Amino acid sequence: WEAAGYLPFSRAKIGAFFQERPVLKNPFLEDALLRGYLKRHMPDKAAVSDLRAFGERVANEVDGWGRECEVTAPRLVHFDPWGRRVDHIVTSPAWKRMKDLSAQEGLVASGYEGTFWEWSRVYQMSKLYLFSPSSGLYTCPLAMTDGAAKVIQSIGASWPVKEALGRLTTRQPERFWTSGQWMTERQGGSDVGHGTETVAVPQTDGSFKLHGFKWFTSATDADMTLTLARVQDGTGATTPGSRGLSLFYAEVSRDEDGRLKGIEVQRLKDKLGTRQMPTAELLLDGLPAHRLSEEGRGVASIANMLTITRIHNSVSAAAAMRRVVQLARDYATRRTAFGKLLKDHPLHIQTLARMEVETRGAFLLVMDVCRLLGREECGIATQLDTHLLRLLTPVVKLYTAKQAVAVVSEGLESFGGQGYIEDTGLPGLLRDAQVLSIWEGTTNVLSLDVLRCVARSSGMVLHAYFSHVKSLLAGASGVSSLAPAVKAVDGALSELEVFVRGAATKAPGYMELAARDLAYSLARIYTGALLIDHACWIEASPSDTYAALRWCENDLCPVATKQARGCFDSGTPPLDAALVFDRPTQ
Ligand code: UCC
Ligand code: FAD
């Protein structure tokens, strides 16, 4: 036996079986819902053929660069060989290729060119959705770049930001700029009104110099940034709180000696994920800047950036889910366990089907917000559209971020042990998903934003919400296959209406406790209505109907469920606190 070479295990022979890896195919061609959605809403041949070609490029070329970004993490070189401080952030060649590709493919520009009129944002975000999981997180600087362009455009571009706007939205790689968004300081990322210590010292020419410390600045290799600071008066005094914050524009540039002008990079963050991208702590030491907003209107003026980046965040969340589902279903056709392929184990496929339902829901919610954004930007938004966009932006961001962590985590498990192995590229998906609920406003902070926008609109945003969901459901009346789903959404909507009516009589603390469940209810009900609406489309597939039915089996109105259990009553906070801080008594 030995002589005949039959020994299956020996040095240089490690067994004959090697598992086939999951294969990334063209993510556009693989995505039935994306294709169906576009066919239904914007059957423009040019858009579809561009997305198809881009999908091919993502699978065959870009995905490899994304991997290169992950394994070649950025590093900070503080000094040149002769001891001069340079603070050079060294990024991988792949990261630089991503920048050029982003310009060429118009990943920001297409949001501003208006080629597809009110559907331009849907088209742009569809492209980013294909790009995101392969982008090596280049979607992060693109999100901030898009947000900065939106702020500059809405404020009205004049010197010096006119040139910047052109660069942020160009398709020419050599002109293309990315932007940062420096808001977070050591004392507060959520509460920037109280956390911002950076001061802006007026200069005689009308410009400012910024002095402060920015605690988190992502994609710090950007060419410019928008940031918040407090203008000092002649005595050096500033106005505290949010009312003291103004919005500033600053270019990140170097002097003749190669030193950053007015910035020292303290260090790069050592992060759980998003390792492809540099995130730095920055000392602003006289950074030249221009005030963009009126004094004290910093938060309100940067809000447009928050809207755009939160939408990008949601696109990336849905995209991460889609990617893990696509890979998991491919793997299910290649991996055998207990004598049959995973795809032939109904329990495994049930697991993937549940992930698919979540992904479909997330996709439709995200695209609907992109649709609303496109309408607003074309000047054709009704008041209902505007209210919906304001309400749904925090909702889609907070809800899809949580979904992404859950779905991607489940997705990793569907590869068994291999899902936990670094060089498969799979663990990075989970690490990167985890940040989606933290940056750009945490789940609680965005839930409170929902409450504030409801209160400030005197309930008009909720009125818009209720009427739109009802109109979506009306389109499904008489469609018997969808009847259980319609009944579930309708019932949940009624429960929500009862909750909202009762809210007027509640103490503020009550609504604060209910905020997260309220936001989840808004997300689940609206998504249910969108799934139903999509399933009513004349060319919808039986799977579209099935997805709607499955989604609507969930608790669509957790705020009502929890209210019935007394979860928001005034007796709850002390009990919660006692539970959280429970310690054994001596
Ligand atoms: O994390 C960051 C970058 C990460 C990298 C980018 C990734 C992008 C996705 C990539 C995917 C791969 S940058 C840091 C982000 N930081 C935040 O998001 C801060 C979170 N905190 C909040 O959102 C808070 O709610 C604050 C800071 C907005 C609260 O501040 P205030 O001052 O207490 O806010 P007020 O009083 O509620 O609002 C002040 C004004 C009001 O306008 P006026 O004065 O006209 O009534 C509000 O209506 O700002 C307006 N405003 C808004 N308007 C506040 N929030 C909004 C909003 N969301 N939309 C419209
Ligand atoms: P805190 O505000 O201290 O929040 C801590 C916890 O308290 C959270 O769970 C929050 O939900 C909760 N909480 C806070 N207030 C309330 C409340 N009123 N009610 C209930 N719960 C509350 N920032 C930038 O400006 N630019 C960047 O480029 C950037 N990049 C980042 C990159 C990464 C990888 C990460 C992780 C963060 C980045 N950030 C950036 C910072 C990010 O935006 C903040 O971390 C985030 O906004 C949260 O702020 P914080 O860290 O101060 O947390």
Image: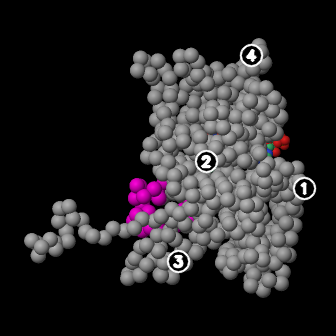
* Whole-percent x, y for residue 442 in the image: 65, 51
Q: Report whether 106 appears left or right of 332.
A: right
Mark with earlier residue (1, 4): 4
Q: Is residue 412 magenta?
A: yes
Mark with earlier residue (2, 3): 2
Q: Give the range drawn in magenta.
A: 404-428
The kind of residue tagged 3 is Ile
393 and 194: which is toward the camera: 393
Check disc 3 and report the residue beneath it.
349
Check disc 2 and report the residue beneath it.
139
Residue 408 visible in the current orientation: yes
* Whole-percent x, y for residue 23 in the image: 47, 64
* Element at label 1: helix
Check disc 1 and report the residue beneath it.
383
The quarter of the picture where residue 96 lies is top right
The quarter of the picture where residue 138 lies is top right
The kind of residue tagged 2 is Thr
Q: Does the residue labelled 4 lie within 8 Å of ligand 2?
A: no
* Element at label 2: helix
